[in-house]
Amino acid sequence: MKKVFFTSDSYHTKENTSRFFLDRLMLNTRLYFMGKYFMIVLKNRGAALQGQYDTEAWAASSYDVFKLIEGCGGKFHITGLENLHKCQGPVVFISNHMSTLETMVFPSIIAPFMEVTFVVKESLVKHPFFGPIMRSRNPIVVSRSNSREDFQTVMKTGANLLSEGTSIIIFPQSTRTVEFKPKEFNSLGVKLARSAKVQVVPIAIKTDFWGNDKYLKDLGPINRSKPIYMAFGEPLAIKGSGKEENEFIIEFISSHLAKWND
């Protein structure tokens, strides 16, 4: 039985959560955080290369990153976890995309409940450092250079994975960004769910605690003054064209961001 790290309907980092001593000693820079993060990735990269990085190991390493973030001053506020229990079979998770944080943390939340993978860009699976880990998770790989081919890849491979019981996480935005622009939020996730006859689960996130670096996007600075928010919505069945459901997901994300930004 897979270990479940979050057993309540919500999770909030305790106010008295202690910081790592060495993180404080390094005067709030990102050096300690990045050093420990690389150690986690390096350890699990080795396991992936040896074929020993399964879903349970993925969830556990994701939780290691989660606890590292908390130990370096990150404060999580996660709601709607009860909705993971309401999923009727595999689903398509549809989320906005701000930073590396959600990619690293989602597995610890979702994978203990169901098999899951991501839609990722090709550069991630070819990355010399992160590539082995990502490839081991059997993701749906898109090029981002040919939108028509990418659409066909997601629809075909996604349908196969869903039919085999694997849920899929999709970030419909073309790139990670702090600003949420509904016009740039495509309906690919809804179209996949409609075609595969599965539910969608909207996710709203605010993860600018972990910034995007100008040159090395995955390794941006961390800002301990910014709380981390994640909200999981109820599973939705797609009816008709899916237009209404896509608009609902956009509103779900927009309304949560508006509340969190107040």
Image (spheres, helix red, strand yellow):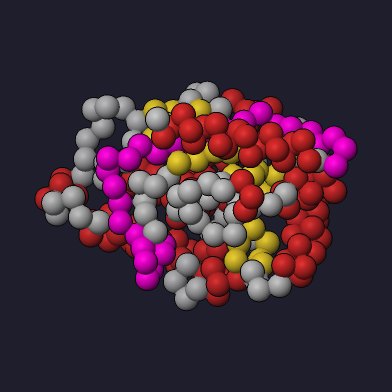
Residue found at x 85% / y 48%: 195
Q: Main secondary structure of the magenta part?
A: loop
Question: What is the residue that sits farthest to the right in this orientation?
Answer: 240
List x then y, in percent, for residue 113. Answer: 61, 37
User: Is the N terminus in the top left, top right, bottom left or bottom right quadrant?
Assistant: top right
Location of residue 255 by image quarter: top right
Q: Is residue 222 magenta?
A: yes
Residue 166 visible at all: no
Left or right of 122 in this view: 230: left
238 or 82, which is in the foreground?
238
Decide: is 38 above or below 12: below
Decide: is 80 above or below 229: above
List x then y, in percent, for residue 153. Answer: 76, 65
List x then y, in percent, for residue 206. Answer: 45, 41
122 or 174, which is in the foreground?
174
Left or right of 242 in this view: 224: left
* Region rendered in magenta: 213-241
Residue found at x 55% / y 72%: 123
Left or right of 201 in this view: 4: left
User: Is the C terminus in the top left, top right, bottom left or bottom right quadrant?
Assistant: top left
Q: Is residue 240 magenta?
A: yes
